[in-house]
Image (tube, grey):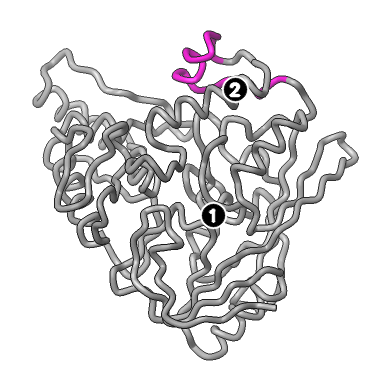
Amino acid sequence: MAVFAEEVNLAGYTTLRLGGPARRFVEATTEAEVVDAVREADADGEPVLVLGGGSNLVVSDEGFSGTVVHVGTRGAEQVTDSHGRVLMRVQAGEEWEPFVARCVADGLAGVECLSGIPGRVGATPIQNVGAYGQDVSETIVEVRAYDRRTGTTVTLSRDECRFTYRNSLFKQTPDRYVVLGVTYALRESDDSQPIAYAELARRLGVEPGARVPLKEARDAVLELRRGKGMVLDPSDPDTRSAGSFFTNPILDAPSLASLERHVAERLGPDATFPRYPESDGRTKTSAAWLIDRAGFAKGHARGRARISTKHTLALTNPDGGSTADLLALAREVRDGVRAAFGVELVNEPVFVGVTL
């Protein structure tokens, strides 16, 4: 049975430890409870916030004046399909990191480079969660969701999810779908998927494209993430963050030419910057590089918020600050990068009751 409460402080449900109270809070532990809570709020004209692990969320200091539905569903079913793939059908409320650990332990490849990422399974298709050369869109087969527009439960194929870099149908239509479960297709193997990320390949001592034992890939990813303060640790203030705060910019040809001019003017005619070709002809560059070269060093603070001392892409709440403090720092960084390089950084976390 769902648990109802009022004026629940949302700071305790986010990895940033920020956010004011929810007017109404529902703890839902079954799919039916999730659907019923959302349907009831919609019928009453009540704003709804669907909450998972709170690892990609920035909530206003004033909180949320509606119903928060905290998804606590559990369960994972393993089946083999007619193509010999191992399908993992996982409830949205399952914690992501223990799920990845289980897959690696069971010799299932496809998500090993996504080790150490906080949050719950239901968030992974929304954000098309990715790291170290893997995205969940590579393994997602389908997503079960409640469609608030039609009042029905639907199953969406991978193509219907419209995955792009850190984006999806669910993110593009944020008030329509509530993710209930995700099915991943994994490969039975003692070895990882080909290592696609250069930094990870260097750490493993292999060439990009090589395969390594699953556990070695996972351990290397966890080591890299810990070094950047990206594995939750109550004793490490740098992990009080929402992960990477800005997405890596993807530039069309005119924007790329503009960045080249800005880099030459600021850093000299021979200066270079990270660039990664995209399949559509555009070019991805590094938000962390732009932030650092715009003059924002690790540990740079504004009020009680600061850039992580380990990684310039993470904005942290190390000392009991406020969402207002965090946003002031985010705006300073965004505006500084725009002034220095003419590139507009876009926030990766979901904002609730605030704007940048």
Residue drawn at (56%, 38%) of the image: 135
Compared to residue 44, the image places residue 240 above or below, namely above
Distance from disc 1 to disc 2, alpha carbons, whole Å, reads 25 Å
Residue type (three-letter) at the residue carrying disc 2: Ala
Residue 24, position as x, y percentages in the image: 48, 81
In the drawing, what numbered circle is on residue 270? none
Residue 27, position as x, y percentages in the image: 59, 72
Residue drawn at (35%, 65%) of the image: 59
Q: Nearer the viewer, mark 1 or mark 2?
A: 2
Question: Which range of residues does the magenta coloring cover?
Answer: 191-208
Q: What residue occupies the far bottom of the structure in this picture?
A: 44
Compared to residue 13, the image places residue 221 above or below, namely above
Residue type (three-letter) at the residue carrying disc 1: Ile
342 lies left or right of 34 = left
Residue drawn at (60%, 67%) of the image: 178
Q: Is residue 207 magenta?
A: yes
Disc 2 designates what residue?
217
Quadrant of the rendering where the N terminus is positioned: bottom right
Residue 291, position as x, y percentages in the image: 22, 35
| The quadrant where residue 209 appears | top right
Disc 1 designates what residue?
126
| Disc with the residue nearer the chain's start (1 vs 2) | 1
192 lies left or right of 49 = right
Predominant SS of the magenta segment: loop
Q: Secondary structure at mark 1?
A: helix
